Amino acid sequence: MGGRAFTDRMGMGPARTVQRRRTGRLAGWLAGAVGLALAAGGALVAAPPSPPPAAASVGGTSVTILIERGDATQGFSTPTVTVAGDGTLSVTNLDTYDHTVTSVALDSAGVPLFDVKVLHGTTMAIPAVDGLASGTYEFYCRFHPNMRGTLVVDRAGGGTTGVEPAYDQSLVVPSVLTGSHLRLRMREAHVRVLPTGPRTPMWTYAGTWPGPTIRRPAGRDTRVTFINDLPRGAGAMSVHLHGDHHAAKDDGQPTRFLIQRGRSRTYHYPLTYGGEPEPSSFFWYHDHRMDHTARNNWRGLQGMFVVKDADGRTLRLPTGARDVPLMVADRSFNEGNRLANPFAAGPQMVHRHGEMRFTGEHAPPNDATTGTHVLVNGRYLPHLDVSATRYRLRLLNASSASAYTFALSDGRPLIQIGTGNGLLPRPVARPELLLGPAQRADVLVDFHGEEGTRVALRSVPRTDSTAGTGSRTAPLMQFRVQGAARDPSLLPTRLPTPELVRAPRRVTKTWRFDLTGDPRTGSAWTINGRAFDPDRVDHRARLGTVERWRLRNTSDVTHYVHIHAEQWRTLSRDGRRPPPWERGLEDTWKLDPGEVVEVAARFTDYTGAFMIHCHMLDHEDHGMMARFDVVP
């Protein structure tokens, strides 16, 4: 199975949208889903579906899927193709960016029926279509999942059709560490990822991927010592506890306070905010080394961290084995189940007029790293035996670039009760839940009355916007519902959400996310037109003050923006009140092209240097990060 896969780094979209004059364009392909939310009064609110417009189609014995310039945002130029008889199918990519044509349907091993990467300016055949039975097959681009299409095969005789994955592996729930002073050794280990064949060599925390889950009470002083025992050539490391509030020296600085090979460093996490215990939170820890964050995370340096507060004991939420952290991440593999290395070919860093730029085939915007296999807790297509009771799932997207829209196969809602930074004011019933890189969601799933059934957790096409880059289509895992059991848990109607800061009306700082440069002189992902310089301070905030920040995406692709240091309130999205699931505390926000989000926080407890950056990790490594200092 590993031999069929490949690793891709590609552009998430063009620098500017090309205006189309051709009729029959595929616009609004992702529109039409019913949005479901639990309103403040408890009523379910549904958004009416809107049908997609007619799209161009082609057919015959020799058929080509056409990708033209600008299709990364517009969709396939030929979204419907028909292959008749013994006809052939190919893809011509006239865009300036690489794409894939990937089947949604899978074979018995969980591999897409066809999955072809097409470099810009080339034509590729799709030979796997020769073996398909008559039928209809959906396809999409894994690099730009908003690009979706349909293949119709019309021929006599048999052939291959898609099947439901077997979900052969058991889900692995990472081991739990609870001590006040922990030691985690970063080392290479062979990890079971794919269901058959050799184990996969990975860089790990304490020998597993994900690393051990740390569970600590809020307000209890915590120290974690990381030892760098990775192979020669790995270099120095830096660990960031994503979402937590702590001193600058313990924040996983990209260039300072590094853990050299053969050395160790102790990070101090008081788990307090403004002198009070932090709210119930779902953080995660991962490498944050400048220029190598994407590589080091890809190799396996990721783990989860749960903060428990006193309110959790009175809410009667699911606990113990029914409180399951799920880290979702994609990877690709070579022969022998070894991790592919998408970072071997650059890009090359250059300097233009004192600014960092990148050149080469994988320079921005052709730099996002995606994998062919989507894994849950480090395993491909696992299953979990559950009782017919409520479960609490803590969802984390730990991918470098891919977004996922989580949904259950039987249509039951995911009841979101929190973000990664605390509980929401009220539960929100969501039939689909979009999480981009680094985003988390705390959800309840109720399996009462479902004894003997099997429910799949999937990523489905994003339906909330036609402007965004989209989300992957993939099966993730399966829940196998066993018998009924005693269930003392409840679904609360109100939750003890953390206190939200009162924000000033004036915007203190605007951060603009865009692509700068060109292929000839070099390009970079930038904030306010400048690539990251660790020695440059882009903003200063005074300790004890509250600031209102504006996040604006002026590029043509979706970004997921993460802010360090504080815990942030979402004030507005495009000038409107944020949706119910964004009314708690946050640290990472989706920014679709043209979107504007305003946030606020009080700068408390710590001074020093902190970061704001896109958490699509190649974007971070290739310039889209800035430094702000909290000063006395």
Image: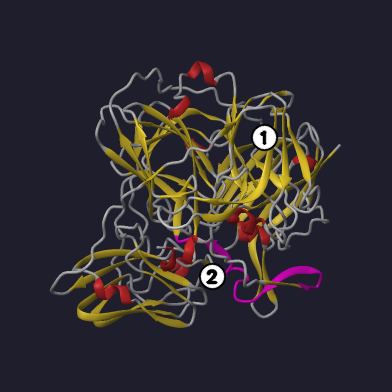
Reading the image, the residue beneath label 2 is 14
Callout 2, which amino acid?
A: Pro
Reading the image, the residue beneath label 1 is 503
Mark 1–mark 2 distance (CA, rounded to whole Å): 36 Å
| Disc number placed over residue 132 in the picture, else none | none
- Front disc: 1 or 2: 2
In which image quadrant can residue 618 be found? bottom right
Determine whether label 1 and label 2 are within 8 Å by CB: no
Dot 1 or dot 2, earlier in sequence: 2
In which image quadrant can residue 322 be found? top left
Q: What stretch is highlighted in magenta?
A: 351-372
Task: Depth check: give the residue in front, 214 or 569.
Answer: 214
Callout 1, which amino acid?
A: Ala
Q: Which residue appears at 71% of the width and 54% of the height?
A: 289
Q: Which x, y percent locates residue 371?
A: 49, 60
Q: Is residue 272 above or below residue 538?
A: above
Quadrant of image for the C terminus? top right
Quadrant of image for the N terminus? bottom left
Q: How many labels does the image show?
A: 2
Task: Depth check: give the residue in front, 159 or 102.
Answer: 159
Kindly give the residue lying farthest to the right in the view shown.
632
